[in-house]
Amino acid sequence: MSQAQIRIMKIKPEKLADSLKLEKLPIYWISSDEHLLAQEAADLVRTHFKNKGFTEREVFNVDKDFKWGQFIHAINNLSLFSEKKVFDLRIRNAKLDQDGKSAIEAFLDHKNPDLVLLIRGPKLESAHINSKWFKTHLPYIALVQIWPVNRKELKNWLSQRLIKEGINADRDALQLLSDKVEGNLLAAIQEIEKLKLLSNTQGQSITLNAKTTMQVIADNSRYDVYKLIDSALLGESARCLKILTSLKGEGIYPLIILGAITRELRSLLHLIEQKEQGQSISAIIQSNRVWFNRKEAVTKALKRSNSKDSWKMLSRARKIDQAIKGMSPVNPWDEISSLILELSGQNISNLAYVN
């Protein structure tokens, strides 16, 4: 294949919908470490092709034990009367091994217009994209590279999402939301859904200020992740388990809960280190501008916490993240129960798990 024939279309996520309308390509590769945005892009591709008659879909979760022969077998066993189909490959490692590369090549060799391959995986490094194999064997690919929303972009991202739901938020409200969800877009979407419910209840668009936003976030229901965190900081272990059980029953994705716990641990560790350097708790609370409605919880947590235990909890959180993503055999809900009780000051040797 000549260099002139090579076409790797790099598509910005906001341009994906328009690109889908213009041209059909055999492969759509979504590259991102931001799970929510990658999921939304994948949903957009799937919905587009479903509307175009691609009514069948087969999903392959590619982990370290995956056998690429399964994928090749699926490609080779299509009948003449098969429906249009999307193969959905979810890869854990952006760098494919030789078997994976051969499987992708086998798909391309079919040159079947009734098939689409959707690949979703971690961020692709420039070295991968510019590699000889990538350029030689993937001549017709739509590469959608999605970058995480950074701190400077987050408020604008939240504002745009809220406006889509008919909600206008002032600067203070956006700052509050930004502080609550920074680093976890799944949690951000959940908070926006709460605010959307408020808007729908009133039957009209609403304008949010910080007071209204705080009420919705803090007082919405028993399913509030942030109530779980505050209860842990206050040392209310029994209430923690009750809230966690409710969250699980409501179907809240465990990664949302773990993200909230991890962010709190990191924030708390920063304060603990100041305490261990000799600063008073009252001075720490004041200098770090802890919200007034969280002062009691943070103060209690600081009094009983130390940096050594906090680092251990962060290490456990990383292992729970692996369990949620299927990379560890342990039950993530059991481990989250253990972690939240430890954060509440309990001895986890006498743990009562969430059932």
Image (tube, rainbow, N blue to C red):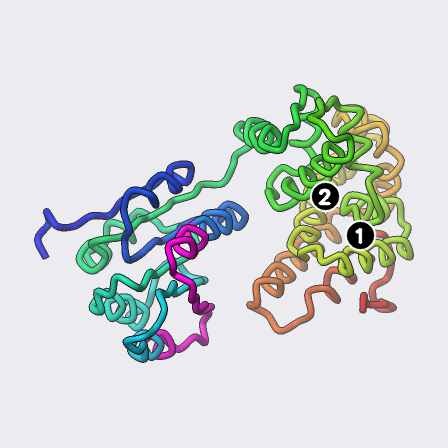
- Residue 57: tell me if it is visible: yes
Q: Which residue appears farthest toward the top when viewing the image? A: 171
Q: Secondary structure at mark 1?
A: helix
Q: Which residue is mark 2?
A: 264
- Across and down, in percent, residue 91 comes to 43, 63
Check the picture and name the quadrant holding the N terminus.
bottom left
- Give the residues in magenta: 45-72
Q: In the displayed orientation, state which residue is furthest to the left.
A: 2
The residue depicted at 62 percent of the width and 65 percent of the height is 323
What's the amino acid at mark 2?
Glu
Residue 343 is tagged as 1
Nearest the viewer among 161 and 94 is 161
- How many other residues sit within 10 Å of disc 1, few (<14), some (14-19) or many (≥20)? many
Q: Toward which corner of the image does residue 296 lie, by quadrant?
A: top right
Asked if 303 appears above or below 278 in the picture, the reply is below
Coordinates of residue 35 in the picture (x, y in percent): 52, 50
Residue beneath the point at 89% across and 49% down: 235
- Identify the element where label 2 is drawn: helix
